[in-house]
């Protein structure tokens, strides 16, 4: 997966001209429809740059690319004074981190996805990052590597045109340290490290501490797109799993955690642990997950699946079936 990440990133890096971010892209034009993304340029669909960024995005969507429509791609033109200052800060810290880690390009700059609402992304473009979006592996700003776009998609929100938006950012990772699940760490554990990840070999979470969120993260592109919601993607994934044969409740739980993202996944994990320890019943598990996801159709699919799987206790199957039936009657 790490090799794939590098290959996908190169698709974007082919068009990275360093200081060229301060210049207008060939074929670009201002976009009246999304004027709230101040300081951005719309990339012309006929350009190689557009094709490269689009390919990176759709590769990250994996099997859902066929159901995804790229509406527009915008580039950070650093046209305002605050944008230029943040760009200058990013380049300065890139040099500092590189020198600290031995020079010769050791800033370890990667690409990462950051999703949110249209308003939230607009605030980031105009004013910079102002909040943390993750706490499962330390408290900081979480981004998803290019190959794991789906992990961060849960945070995206459709606007009034049913269009969603996601940032593709450059991230100074420097020397990374593993942050264990459940950690409340907020800073590097020592001066040796610059950032955090959940796994050194194949990270799915890039963790930038709040201290560095506006010096080590540089929004590069915004991709505006239309795609199925994360809930729909989860239901599709459950259907795919069911076609493979018998699946345990624990396997369905892992699927939910994967598609619903780290925040909701942590809540579901705690509830599932209570269920496994018999602290809550199947119906209570159902009710808790329903509250977390807020989606009835999703839960019907989950519990329909669990009724046909091999589990150890018939009572659990009965609870699942009763819960699904109860939901259908509502």
Image (cartoon, helix red, strand yellow):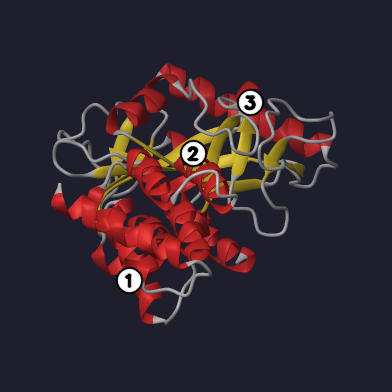
At numbered mark 2, what does the secondary structure look like: helix, strand or loop?
Answer: helix
Disc 3 or disc 1, which is closer to the eye? Answer: 1
Q: Residue 239 carries which label?
A: 1
Query: In the image, what residue occupies the spot 27% across and 44% down?
Result: 164
Judge the density around disc 2: few (<14), some (14-19), many (≥20) Cα neighbours within 10 Å.
some
At numbered mark 3, what does the secondary structure look like: helix, strand or loop?
Answer: helix
Who is closer to the viewer here, 199 or 327? 327
- Do the residues bearing badges 3 and 1 touch, measured as CB atoms within 8 Å? no
The location of residue 177, given as percent across then percent down, is: 76, 42
The location of residue 159, given as percent across then percent down, is: 20, 37
- Do the residues bearing badges 2 and 3 touch, measured as CB atoms within 8 Å? no
Q: Which of marks 3 and 1 is nearer the N terminus?
A: 3
CA distance for labels 3 and 1: 41 Å
Judge the density around disc 3: few (<14), some (14-19), many (≥20) Cα neighbours within 10 Å.
some
Residue on which the image places disc 3: 212
Residue on which the image places disc 2: 263
At numbered mark 1, what does the secondary structure look like: helix, strand or loop?
Answer: helix
Image quarter of residue 90:
top right
Q: Is residue 93 above or below residue 314?
A: above
Q: Which of marks 2 and 3 is nearer the N terminus?
A: 3
Query: In the image, what residue occupies the spot 73% across and 53% down?
Result: 200
Query: In the image, what residue occupies the spot 45% across and 34% down?
Result: 22
Q: Is residue 309 above or below residue 315?
A: below
In the rendered image, the quadrant that contains the N terminus is bottom right
Who is closer to the viewer here, 96 or 298? 298
Query: In the image, what residue occupies the spot 14% across and 41% down?
Result: 161
């Amino acid at each position: 997966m790490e090799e794939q990440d590098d290959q996908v990133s190169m698709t974007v890096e082919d068009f990275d001209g360093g200081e060229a971010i301060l210049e207008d892209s060939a074929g670009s034009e201002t976009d009246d429809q999304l004027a709230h993304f101040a300081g951005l340029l719309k990339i012309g669909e006929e350009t190689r740059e557009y094709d490269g960024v689009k390919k990176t995005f759709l590769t990250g969507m994996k099997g859902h690319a066929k159901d995804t429509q790229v509406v527009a791609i915008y580039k950070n033109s650093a046209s305002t004074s605050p944008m230029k200052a943040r760009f200058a800060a990013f380049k300065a810290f890139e040099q500092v981190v590189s020198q600290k880690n031995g020079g010769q390009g050791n800033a370890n700059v990667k690409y990462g996805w950051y999703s949110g609402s249209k308003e939230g992304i607009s605030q980031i473009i105009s004013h910079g990052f102002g909040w943390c979006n993750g706490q499962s592996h330390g408290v900081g700003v979480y981004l998803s590597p290019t190959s794991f776009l789906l992990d961060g998609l849960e945070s995206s929100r459709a606007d009034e045109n049913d269009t969603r938006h996601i940032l593709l950012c450059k991230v100074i990772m420097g020397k990374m340290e593993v942050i264990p699940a459940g950690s409340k760490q907020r800073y590097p554990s020592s001066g040796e490290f610059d950032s955090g990840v959940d796994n050194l070999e194949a990270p799915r979470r890039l963790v930038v501490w709040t201290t560095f969120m506006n010096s080590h993260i540089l929004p590069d592109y915004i991709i505006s797109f239309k795609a199925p919601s994360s809930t729909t993607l989860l239901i599709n994934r459950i259907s795919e799993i069911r076609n493979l044969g018998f699946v345990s409740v624990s396997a369905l739980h892992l699927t939910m955690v994967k598609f619903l993202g780290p925040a909701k996944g942590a809540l579901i994990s705690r509830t599932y642990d209570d269920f496994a320890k018999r602290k809550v019943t199947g119906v209570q598990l159902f009710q808790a997950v329903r509250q977390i996801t807020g989606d009835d159709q999703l839960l019907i699919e989950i519990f329909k699946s669990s009724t046909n799987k091999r589990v150890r206790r018939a009572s659990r199957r009965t609870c699942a079936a009763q819960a699904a039936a109860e939901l259908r009657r509502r």
